[in-house]
Image (spheres, grey):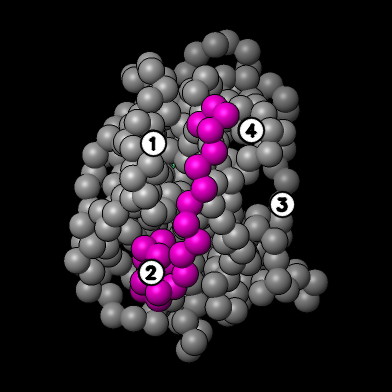
Amino acid sequence: MEINKIQHSKLDKVDPNNSAFGVNISDHMLICVFKDGKWGEPVIMPYGGMNYSPALMAIHYGQAIFEGMKAYKDSNDNVFLFRPEKNFERFNKSAERLAMPKITKEIFLDGLLSLIDLDRNWVPTKEGNSLYIRPTMFASEEMFSARISNEYTFAIMTSPANSYYDKPLKIKIEDYYTRAVDGGVGFTKCAGNYGASFYPTKLANEAGYDQVIWTDSKEHLYFEESGTMNVMVRIGDVLYTPPTSNTILSGITRDSLVTIAKHNKIEVKEERISVDDIFNAYKSGNLKEIFGCGTAVVINRYSHVAYRDFIMELPELDEKNSFAIFLKKQLVDLQTNKSEDPFGWRYKVEKKL
Ligand SMILES: *Cc1c(COP(=O)(O)O)cnc(C)c1O
């Protein structure tokens, strides 16, 4: 793989242990171009602008997908990825649905390992911090025909991220707008899913809520996701999460938490959750926790859940009795090499460069 190193690292100006999410992008990026029906050679180069015109097809017709993953450092400066093959597989599922070419494992995974190895000094050491990794692919032909693009650019960028302060949030159950429909693209990480969710989220913010819980598009009665995360509900001592589907993205955090919960003898039910179920549990005093889960935040707990004008206040739990806090600690300890890895999920980034 061709590697063009940066002249002067930006690490003399950026503190990876004190960087807001997604703001400081690391020294290098990986670029690979698809043209004439095949992928070219991947190149690692200094992060920076690229030369495209506003006729870029991704901008007009939305063939743009991405992934979100993280690298973690343990106390001995070893660097680990977490289940990266899962991101690779999901990336290609998104690519297929958007009629984009699949990327090879060599370009995605070997490219990722070389990039993280080269920029390993960007992986934060402070507890809870990590290096956020953003693989992306977009249509990079420049013309106006509304058709499948013939050219694509695959890129991987990274950015040090502080741990989110997980203050419990106020959330609104969305009963009008829709994130995903049957037969649509809800299960993919395509750019348009995010663009379309910003307006309803803005309305929720203006009404005093931090985030929305998306419900099914037909009746708005069943929980789907919360914001850009999967959603979990604890009723009594049972943890519920809706089964993944073509409208519910198959989160790697979701899958990992379900596995860890079962491993710790917590009863998990992957079942549809209705607004009625939530009301009934609330009335009987059994609605204990609702939280979102995803790579960026790990777990976001909710303190208030609103449906129309009715606001449900959830109990304040702590590390002794909250499933969310327990599961988050189990997952982060595993990711950062503080605990055993019975599932074989950690993936060490060897020092080669
Ligand atoms: C990325 C994403 C998730 C979380 O997936 P993870 O693999 O856990 O990061 C959940 N829902 C949506 C809509 C997403 O885009």
- Which region shows up in magenta? 307-334
Label pair 4/3, CB-CB below 8 angstroms: no
* Mark 1, residue position: 279
Q: Earlier in the sequence, mark 2 or mark 1?
A: 1
Q: Is residue 25 left or right of residue 280?
A: right
Toward which corner of the image does residue 280 lie, by quadrant? top left
| Residue at image point 72% right, 33% down | 206
What is the C-alpha distance between the residues marked 3 and 1? 50 Å
Amino acid under label 1?
A: Phe
The answer for how far apart the CA atoms under marks 2 and 3 are is 47 Å
Point out the frontmost of discs 4 and 3: 4
Residue identifier under label 3 = 48
Position of residue 170 relative to residue 205, above or below, is below
- Distance of mark 1 from mark 4, alpha carbons? 20 Å
**Eye-nearest disc, 2 or 3:** 2
Q: Amino acid at mark 2?
A: Asn
For residue 163, what is the image quadrant?
bottom right
Q: Secondary structure at mark 4?
A: helix
Dot 4 corresponds to which residue?
A: 204
Q: CA distance from mark 2 to mark 4?
A: 30 Å
Q: Is residue 302 left or right of residue 94?
A: right
Asked if residue 15 is positioned above or below residue 316 in the image, the reply reads: below
